[in-house]
Image (spheres, rainbow, N blue to C red):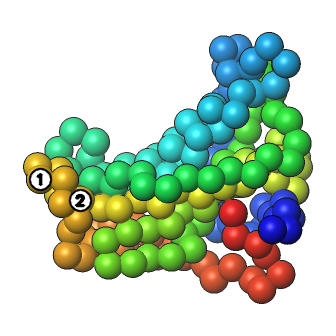
Amino acid sequence: MARPKPHRRADYPHAREITTRWMDNDAYGHVNNVVYYSFFDTAVNGWLIERGALDIERSTVVGLVVETGCQYFAPLSYPQPVTAALRVAHVGRSSVRYEIALFAPDADIAAAQGHFIHVYVERATRRPVGHLPEPLRRALEPLCVVPQPQEESP
C-alpha cells in the first residue's frame, strides 16, 4: 500500500491550538505516539462540547471509538504548541469518521494525520442508536468534507 501524502491545513475546515506539556516528550526528545491520540480526542470532543452536541456527564448518546489510525511524517516536541485540524469524512446512521491532522507552528504540511471512527450508542445500554441525534448532526455539518481524489485518507 502506498504511503499517504501529508495533508495541508487548507484541507480542514477547523483548527485549534493545543499546548504540549513536558511529559508529552519521550526519551527520544519528541512527542510520544500515544499522545497524538490524546490530541485527536481533544480536537473531536472539544468541538462537540463547545457546540452542545456532547455533555460528557449527562448525554444519553455517546460516541465510542471503534477504529483509529495515524501516519507520522515529522516529529513534534515540547514546548512547541500543536495545531489540531479537524474534518468529518463520513456520517453514517450511527457512526462518524473524524479525520485529524496535527501541525507544527507555522507549518502548512501535517506532521501527522489520522482518524477516529465513533459509533454512537445509548449510554445506558451501549447499543448503537438508530440515527444520530439532531444536535450532533448540526455540529458535524461545518466539518463535513469530501476528500479530494489526490488525497489518501488516513
Identity of the residue furthest to the left in this view: 124
Task: Identify the image quadrant of residue 105.
Answer: top right
The vertical placement of 116 against 18, above or below, is: below
- At label 1, the amino acid type is Thr
State the CA–CA distance, disc 2 to disc 1. 8 Å
Residue 102 seen by the camera: yes
Give coordinates of residue 83: x percent, y percent.
71, 45
What secondary structure is marked by label 2?
Answer: strand
Q: Which mark is residue 121?
A: 2
Q: How many labels does the image show?
A: 2
**Residues under numbered marks 2 and 1 in contact, where contact means CB atoms less than 8 Å apart:** yes
Answer left or right for 1 relative to 66. right
Instruction: Name the residue at 77% across, 86% down.
Output: 149
The vertical placement of 74 against 141, above or below, is: above
The vertical placement of 50 against 99, above or below, is: above
Instruction: Name the residue at 62% across, 32% down.
Output: 34
What secondary structure is marked by label 1?
Answer: loop
Give coordinates of residue 10: x percent, y percent.
78, 68
* Residue assigned mark 1: 125
Q: Relative to the observer, which residue lies in front, 114 or 11?
A: 114
Give coordinates of residue 148: x percent, y percent.
75, 83
